[in-house]
Image (cartoon, rainbow, N blue to C red):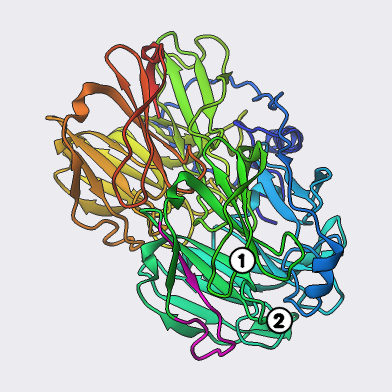
Amino acid sequence: MSSVESGRRATPTRSTRTRRLAACTALVLSAGMLLAAAPASADDTAPQQRTLTERPASSADLRPALSLPEHTAQRQAAAASAAKPRADFDDDGYSDLVYRNYESDLRTTPSSADGEYGFEIPGKAPSAFKDLIPIGDQTGDGVADLLTLSPYGSLTFRAGMSGAGTGNAGWTGKGWQIYNKVLSPGDLTGDGRADLLGRTPAGELYLYPATGDTSTAPFAARVLVGKGWGTYDQLIGANDVTGDGIADLYGRTVSGDLYFYTGTGSAKAPLTAATRVGHGWKIYNQVIGADDLDGDGRGDLLARALNGDVFVYLSTGDSGELAPRVAGGSGLNTASLLAGAGGSPDFGKNDLLGLDTKGTLWAYWSLNNGKLSARDQLSDPGGWKGAKPFYASSMNENALVDLMEAHESGVYNYSYAPGEPPRISGSWGSYNLTVGPGDLTGDGKGDLLTRDTGGTLYLHPGNGTGSGLAARVRVGGGWNAYSVIIGAGDFTGDGIADVLGRTFDGVLKMYRGTGDKYKPFLSPFPVGRGWNTYTKLAAPGDLTGDGKADLVGVDRNGSLYLYASNGAGQFAVPVRLGGGWNTYGILN
C-alpha cells in the first residue's frame, strides 16, 4: 500500500479528509512503525521536539459560479452525428467539468451548471493525481471514462460511473513521466474512440491510438506526430470543432497566439498544418476544451482569467474560428487542477513557509489568482526558534508540500509523521543550504539539493515516500558564488524542475533542469540584474494557476512582490502583494 493510500500525509494539510488520515497515522506511528527512517547513531543529537498544529480548512466558499450556454433543441437535432463527448459523466450527452479544488477535494459541475457535486475516484486520495484526462466512452456503456496520471508516471484507466465518479483502477501503464503533457483531444483516427497524445520536454508529440481493449492494452504503439510542439505552453484538445466527427486541436504560444490543427482521421498523419486563429490569449491562465457547449455539434472552449472569471468561446467555422467571448461565470480560481485544461500540470508545491523572528511557524497557500491565502499558524508561539525549517516540493505521491527541518544530525520530514518525524538522511552538518525543488532525476519523485561549506552542490534523489533518500550525487563545485539558491517546479516550460541562483552582486541566473541525475542542469543563463534589492527570495511554486513556477521577493521595507513566470525562463513585471514580510527570518 502506498503512503497516500495508507494516509501517511500530515501537516501541513488543507482538507478534513487528510486531517482524519493524519490522526490515524499518528496512532500507527506511535506503535513503533517508523521502519523506513534512517537509524540514529550514538553521536547524533536529534533536534528538540517541535510542536505543530493542524492547518484549518478554508472557510471560503470554494464553489465556482458558472453560467454556460443552453442546449437548444434545434441545435441538438443538428448535432446528432457529432463526436461523442469526452467527459459526460451524467449521461446527458454533454461534457461535465471535473476539477480538484485547493482543499484537495474532487468536484464536478455538470454541463447545465446547475450545481456542484462530489466526484469520487476509489483507492487514492484526490491529492495523489498529477492530472485527470477525460477519455470518452471506451467501454461502450454510454458513460465517459477517465485516465488518471500519477507524478511517478503511472497512467491508469478508470471506467466511469454515471454522475458519481469512476470505478476502481483498471489497466495501468508505467513510464508516462517522460511526457510533460498527456491529453486526449478526442477521436483522431476515425474509429469512434478517443485517442491519446503525449508531448516530451524536447517538444516531440506522439499519438497513441485507442484500441478498445481497456483491460490489457487500451492504446496501440505510439506514432510520432511531429517535433517543435514545445512552442506551445498550452495544448487544448477540443474534440470535433469542424463537424466532421474527427478530433481537432488548439495550441497556445507563450506570447498568446492561438493556433488550430484540423484532425485528418489518419493515424499516420493525424493533424493538418497549423492555422493562426487568435491572439492575446496569454491573459488566460488555463484554456479548457469543453466539447460542445451549445448543442451545435462543434467543440467549444472555456478560458479562465487570472481572477477566476470564466469566458466561453463558441466555435463558428471549419477552420477553428471562434465567436467573440461571452461571460461564463466566476470563481474558478478555486480549482487547482482542471480535467482537460491545456496547461502542463504542476505538482508538489503551491505554498510559502515563514518562520518569524520569534520562532513561530506560519504558512500561506496559493489562491491560483496571483494572491496568497491568509496565513495559518503551524506551531506554538516560539516553538521553532533556532530551527531551520523549509518546504520541499512533495517528496511522496501527492500534490502537497512537505515540511522538513535541516539539522546537524540529519534532515527530518514532519509531513511524513508530525509527532515523530523520521530522519530521512543523516550527517547534515556539513551543508549550509538545503532546497527541495521537485523532481530532478526524471522519475517523478521529489528530490533535495544541498551545498556544503566548500561550495559543492549535491543531489539527493528521493525514494518516493518521503521517508528516505538515495546516495547523494555530486553536481559540481563553485556554488558558493550564490547568496541564494531556490527552486520549486518548472520555470522554463518544459515540465522539468529548474533552480535559480543569485550572485552576491545581484545577478539572477537560471539553471534549466535536464531530468538526468548525473547532469541535472544545463549551463546557466542570466535572468537579470539588480536582484539584491530583495533581502529574501523564495520559490512558492505556481501562484497564478497556469502551472508555471513563480518567484517572490521581500524588499528592505518588508514589501512582498510576485514575479509571475512566463514559462520561458523570464518573469513578468513585479506585483506588490503586501507589507510586513520582514517579520520573517526564514521564508521559502
- Foreground residue, 523 or 322? 322
- Within 10 angstroms of label 2, few (less than 14), some, or many (20 or more) residues? many
For residue 193, the mark is 2
Residue identified by numbered label 1: 316
- Foreground residue, 509 or 209? 209
Which label lies toward us, 1 or 2?
1
Residue 326 drawn at (x, y percent) = 63, 47
Amino acid type, residue under disc 1 in the picture: Thr
Q: Residue at x 55, y 35 (%)?
A: 307
Res. 29 image quadrant: top right
Q: Residue at x 28, y 54 (%)?
A: 512
Question: Relative to 524, is 15 above or below?
Answer: above
Q: Residue furthest left?
A: 505
Cα–Cα span, label 1 and label 2: 24 Å
Q: Residue at x 29, y 45 (%)?
A: 570
| SS state under label 1 | loop
Res. 291 image quadrant: bottom right
Q: Sequence order check: which comes first, mark 1 or mark 2?
A: 2
Q: Are marks 1 and 2 in contact (CB under 8 Å)?
A: no
Residue 37 drawn at (x, y percent) = 54, 43
User: What span is colored magenta in the figure?
Assistant: 257-272
Question: Relative to 303, is 290 above or below?
Answer: below
**In what quadrant of the picture does the N terminus appear?**
bottom right
Query: From the viewer's perspective, is 500 left or right of 126?
Result: left
Query: From the viewer's perspective, is 212 left or right of 474?
Result: right
For residue 423, the mark is none
Asked if residue 362 is among those painted magenta in the image, a careful observer would answer no
Residue 567 drawn at (x, y percent) = 37, 51
Question: Relative to 389, is 424 above or below?
Answer: below
Asked if residue 271 is among those painted magenta in the image, a careful observer would answer yes
